[in-house]
Amino acid sequence: MGKIGGLQHLQQLGLNLTSAQRQAILDFLSLSSENRKVVLDTIVKNAAIAKGM
């Protein structure tokens, strides 16, 4: 599934994304797999900090 197909799939699931959200997803998908992992690890760490873990 291509990037655009993936976005269309999210919309079919009822996720109406703003143009900024769509662009953020496209930007994320354009990263190398290693950089995507760094971004996801950072999000998980920040969520854990926010929960006080």
Image (cartoon, rainbow, N blue to C red):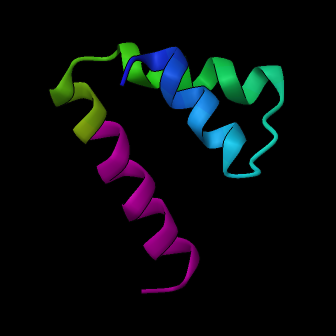
Residue 35 covered by magenta stretch: no
Vertical placement of 2 versus 35: above or below? above
Vertical placement of 32 versus 52: above or below? above
Most extreme residue toward the front is: 12
| Residue 16: x %, y % from top left | 82, 41
Q: Identify the residue shown where x is 19% and y is 27%.
A: 33
Does residue 7 appear left or right of residue 53 in this picture? right
Does residue 28 appear left or right of residue 35 in this picture? right
Q: Identify the residue shown where x is 57% and y is 37%.
A: 9
Q: Main secondary structure of the magenta part?
A: helix
| Residue 12: x %, y % from top left | 69, 42
The total of numbered circles placed on residues is 0
Vertical placement of 42 versus 45: above or below? above
Vertical placement of 37 versus 49: above or below? above
Quarter of the image for the C terminus: give it.
bottom left
Residue 51 covered by magenta stretch: yes
Residue 22 occupies which quadrant of the picture? top right
Does residue 43 appear left or right of residue 33 in this picture? right
Quarter of the image for the N terminus: give it.
top left
- Closer-to-camera residue (14/24): 14
Q: Identify the residue shown where x is 39% and y is 17%.
A: 2
User: Which residue range is magenta in the image?
Assistant: 38-53
Residue 37 occupies which quadrant of the picture? top left
- Closer-to-camera residue (30/41): 30
- Closer-to-camera residue (49/2): 2
| Residue 47: x %, y % from top left | 50, 68
